[in-house]
Amino acid sequence: MSDAKTSVGADLDRLVELLAGRRIAVLTGAGVSTDSGIPDYRGPSSPPRNPMTYQQFVGDAAFRQRYWARNHVGWRAMDGSRPNLGHRALARLERMGVVSGLITQNVDLLHTKAGHRRVIDLHGTYARVCCLHCGALISRMTLAERLEAANPGFAADAKASGVEVAPDADAVVADTEGFRMVDCASCGGMLKPDIVYFGESVPKDRVAAAYELVDDADALLVAGSSLTVMSGLRFVRHAAKHGRPVVIVNRGRTRGDDLASLTVDAGCSHALSALVDALGIPEASRTRQRVS
């Protein structure tokens, strides 16, 4: 396996050679959504981030209050985000029959918005909320209406001052002390986004479905993930262990580089669009393509 990073321009032909004629499973991370205005967690230019852990959320009311206040603003920005060229390229590869399915570590639903049909939202999505007591599920919009009634004008005031939104829909809002939380309307239990937090396990059936997708494919393409957490890295290890080529497209190094057949240091929109163009050309007439 090679861990040498290469640009798209230097290795587009190698990328096509490895993936052409194969059924590809895809694993994506936050780097695929940066061109949609959602910042990365661990990209080369990303600021340090300290996402809330599951233990903090369930164990401390002050943490929950801060989270819901910031999320009350941030989820709207995420809901309004739109797929970029990278999302659309992957959806097109699925329509072409090249991509058999996609596992995403993102919670932004942008692959679904781009038209992907087989998506495993490994960490859940921003659009649902669950009760930790009775298991009831509600839409994030429904909760937004209740939170707005309890905190009139809070979101509008925060947005007016300008906010940055993290990949988990957490907005940077300084003053959250007066924010009022609400509980489950059915049982009064604690509400939590239907998102897998740090320190929380991904549901077993979801993990099993992701492994099955990798097993059914001939290669694994990783796009926009540093593979820092085991949640995604395990699928790279699994693919490599079973002899499936692993190709990684990401800005900066990843924990999976040593397992990859090819690593491409590039933005996802650029590289994936080039891959679609190259795979759409019959091999006999394919000319050497170069992108800067």
Image (spheres, grey):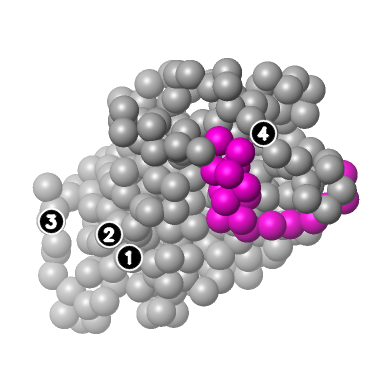
Q: Nearer the viewer, residue 239 or 208?
A: 208
Residue 236 in sight? no
Among the two numbered marks 3 and 2 on one chain, the one whose residue lies closer to the N terminus:
2
Residue occupied by mark 2: 85
The reply, left or right, for residue 16 in relation to residue 102 is left
Among the two numbered marks 4 and 3 on one chain, the one whose residue lies closer to the N terminus:
4
> Which stretch appears magenta?
133-151
- Residue 47 picture quarter: top left
In the figure, 8 relative to 97: above or below?
above
Q: Position of residue 64 (x, y in %)?
A: 67, 27
Tag 2, which secondary structure? helix
Q: Nearer the viewer, residue 288 or 91?
A: 91
**Which amino acid, by three-letter code, is at mark 3?**
Arg
Specify the label residue 181 is tagged with. Answer: 4
- Distance in Å between CA atoms under marks 4 and 2: 37 Å
Q: Are marks 2 and 1 in contact (CB under 8 Å)?
A: yes
Which residue appears at 38% of the width and 54% of the height? 80
In the figure, 111 relative to 268: above or below?
below
- Residue 12 picture quarter: bottom left
**Which amino acid, by three-letter code, is at mark 1?**
Ala
Mark 4 vs mark 2: give the one in front. Answer: 4
Which residue appears at 67% of the width and 34% of the height? 181
Mark 3 vs mark 1: give the one in front. Answer: 1
Residue occupied by mark 1: 89
Which residue appears at 45% of the width and 19% of the height? 174
